[in-house]
Amino acid sequence: MAIKEDIERGNDSVFESAAVSLLQDENDMAGKEDGYTDQTSSKASLWMVYFSTFVAVCGSFEFGSCAGYSSPTQTAIRTDLSLSLAEYSMFGSILTFGAMIGAITSGPIADFIGRKGAMRTATGFCVGGWLAIYFAEGALLLDVGRLATGYGMGVFSYVVPVFIAEIAPKNLRGALTTINQLMICTGVSVAFIIGTVLTWRTLALTGLIPCAVLLFGLFFIPESPRWLAKIGREKEFEAALQDLRGKDTNISKEADEIRDYIETLERLPKAKMLDLFQRRYLSFVIIGVGLMVFQQFGGINGICFYVSNIFETAGFSAAVGTIIYAILQVVITGLNTTVIDKAGGKPLLLVSSTGLVLGCILSGVSFYLKDHNLALDAVPILAVTGILIYISAFSAGMGAVPWVIMSEIFPINIKGVAGSLATLVNWFGAWAVSYTFNFLMSWSSYGTFILYAAINAGAILFVVTLVPETKGKTLEQIQAAINA
């Protein structure tokens, strides 16, 4: 999940504007913003920041609703519409293809019509997508709807954290941007839970609720001051900043710092995709892209998209298992936001990857026993334990930490294009895993989880040998350590 000015060098390459879910670049601003934190410390004067964040993270919740939809609905949709395994796999995975397109276009959209305009655009696609799914009578309209919601999801995953990072004061930026990831997990979990009691068509209609709240709320919140400053709308820039900081707050120092920061970034050389393969940048790219490869190809989207079917196949109640999975995911993600800065990214990645290996092995053993008619009473509990360990481990580290590290390791002059490359690799991995998961399970259910266990074991070696610890270090110190 870098503020927009760090990645908006997208005019030279479409990839440069595809930065999905990039985290805030709070460290880059830290040295320039000392001094205004005290001015903005009054909670009473910051109600607009909190309200604006609430409105924006309705987009994050919508993201989660889109991602969580396919798991509890698989059996019902395939039965009602007589879909083959291949057709449903296409329906489940085409979401991530749409998100890839949304990622590529989100930067130019947010530049041209603003952050609020981009959120309205994403909402429009999600509304159209949910309605298409609701009225679908066959695979074609289902896929069109899923593709549209995926596009909206891709735009949201970029513009929401960017908007929050741009409106929040330095002392609140880290806390507020973590709400984005928490609300995505909450959206997924809510879809899982209510999907156990609602029909698949009704569940599609519930996806319209966060869209309605977001569209209504956007009428009452200001545009990003940094975007307004960048396009030269000075009066609106100052008015928006005053709105966000409180009418009695002196914003002159912060306003000057924002102007200076934007001017500095405008003077930076514009990096191209091929520049990333220069020897001086290669280590950064290997770490950033490598983390995204292991995050996705470790199996998360296959398991997340089809977890209900996994429980059914193992002989466990899909409703009970899905609800436990959903609650656990939110709790662990919430706890992780409080410890990531204290524990450090590298230890969390190692603990998380180890847990992923253990979860995959337990699930693989359970399906092996089932396939060979051994200890059948132990199969459901082993499968459920494995899946719950897996999602707990993923939420504890591998889910969020790669995005944090990516925002820290790239030098500022390549941050946009490198972040875009890593993000597109991430979305490609999400599509590949979600599309192939059902086919792999048909090939060998236990073999699928052993394959994921091997990939996650590779992640442990990758983290130990290549990933630096970033805790307590400046960006310059991190980048110098990687170069060394």
Image: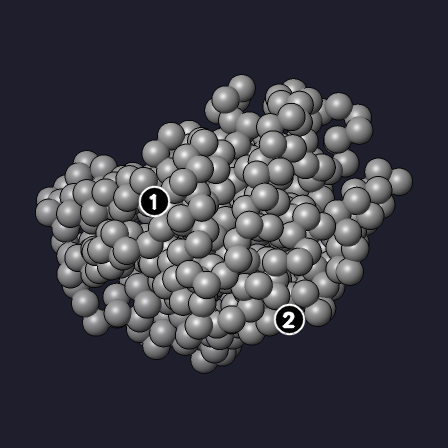
Residue wearing tag 1:
116
Identify the mark at residue 452; answer none if there is no mark.
Answer: none
Query: For the view shown, which residue lies furthest in the bottom direction?
Result: 377
Closer-to-camera residue (22/402): 22
Closer-to-camera residue (446/352): 352
Classify mark 1: residues with Cα within 10 Å, few (<14), some (14-19) or many (20+).
many
In the figure, 76 relative to 104: above or below? below
Q: Is residue 87 visible?
A: no
In the figure, 54 relative to 109: above or below? below
The answer for how far apart the CA atoms under marks 1 and 2 are is 31 Å
Q: Earlier in the sequence, mark 1 or mark 2?
A: 1
Residue 149 vs residue 424: left or right? left
Which element carries disc 2, helix, strand or loop?
helix
Q: Residue at x 40, y 48 (%)?
A: 239
Which element carries disc 1, helix, strand or loop?
helix
The spot of residue 208 in percent (x, y) is 21, 55
Closer-to-camera residue (436/16): 16
The spot of residue 155 in percent (x, y) is 38, 41
The spot of residue 358 in percent (x, y) is 63, 66
Q: Residue at x 23, y 42 (%)?
A: 124
Of badges 1 and 2, nearer the viewer stands 1
What kind of residue is marked 2? Val
Q: Residue at x 45, y 31 (%)?
A: 232
Query: For the view shown, which residue lies furthest in the right direction?
Result: 484
What kind of residue is marked 1? Lys
Closer-to-camera residue (229/415): 229
Q: Is residue 186 visible?
A: yes
Instruction: Give residue 242's quadrant in the image.
Output: bottom left
In the figure, 484 relative to 27: above or below? above
Residue wearing tag 2:
339
